[in-house]
Each structure stands twice: as C-alpha cells, then as structure tokens.
Amino acid sequence: MERGTYKEFKIPISLVMLAITLFLFILDVIYFFSLGILPLNFQSFLTTIGGWTYYIFLLSLVGIIYFAYLLASTVSQRRKFEELIFTDSKATFVKNEKDLDVISRKLGPSFRKRYEEKKGQLRVR
C-alpha cells in the first residue's frame, strides 16, 4: 500500500463519520426533550449511561462540525485541482503550479501522480 493512500478515502470516511455523529446528535436531542418517538432500546441505553449523554451530545456536535468541514474542504480542493489540471496552457499551469503542488500533496498519491504526469506533458521543470 502506497504511503498516504488513506487520503484517497477522505470523502467516504467523512460521510460515514458525519452520519454517525449526526445520528448520535439527533438521538441525544430527542432524549433531552423527552419526545415520545425514541425507541425503547435507545431510551434504555441513554438512561443507563446517565450523565454521559451530555458528553456524547458535545462530542457529536464537535464531530458534526469537524467532519462537515473536512468533507467541504476536500470537495473544494478536488474541484480546484480538477479545474487547474485540465488546462492546456503552459503559462496558466506554471502560474498555478504552487497551488497544484500543495493540493496534490493533500489529496493523495493518485492526485500527485496526475500532477506529475501533467507537468511532464507540458514539459515544466
């Protein structure tokens, strides 16, 4: 496995973690407001853990914010990379080379490989 391959899976990991934290957040909100729509097994679980529900609430809130930011950031970087890499102009590529280099390092080995291939295709040092 190539070094940094986990970066390729940022979007699916962020989506799964966002769904989990959102589920926990909604579960806690329903529990706190004592709405009758919470299934019995979830209600008994939250009652059993007692005061820890506040920590789960805080952790899920922080998780929602963090994973939503990570997802939005990764999608934004991928879009920017795709826009900048599909240029046939050497001048435009050289002008944006620093941004492409930074973004390709953040996104993982396959993006780094595409960046290097484009660099070779346009004959940029």
Image (cartoon, helix red, strand yellow):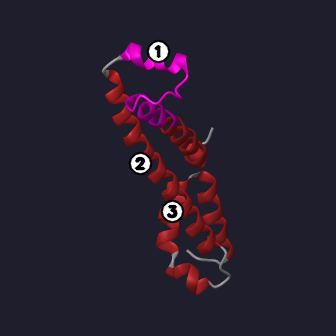
Question: Disc 3 marks which residue?
Answer: 103
Quarter holding residue 78? bottom right
Q: Residues within 10 Å of mark 1 (few under 14, many from 20)?
A: few
The numbered mark, 3 or 1, whose residue comes first in the sequence reads 1
Q: CA distance from mark 2 to mark 1?
A: 28 Å
Residue in the picture at 61% in, 73% down: 83
The Cα–Cα distance between marks 3 and 1, rounded to whole angstroms, is: 47 Å
User: Is residue 3 among the parts visible in the rendering?
Assistant: no
- Magenta residues (range): 23-49
Whether residues under marks 3 and 1 lie with C-beta atoms below 8 angstroms apart, the answer is no
- Horizontally, residue 43 falls left or right of residue 33, namely right
For residue 112, what is the image quadrant?
A: bottom right
Q: Amino acid at mark 1?
A: Ser
- Side of 53 relative to 16 (left or right): left
Disc 1 designates what residue? 44
Is 82 located above or below residue 58 in the figure? Answer: below
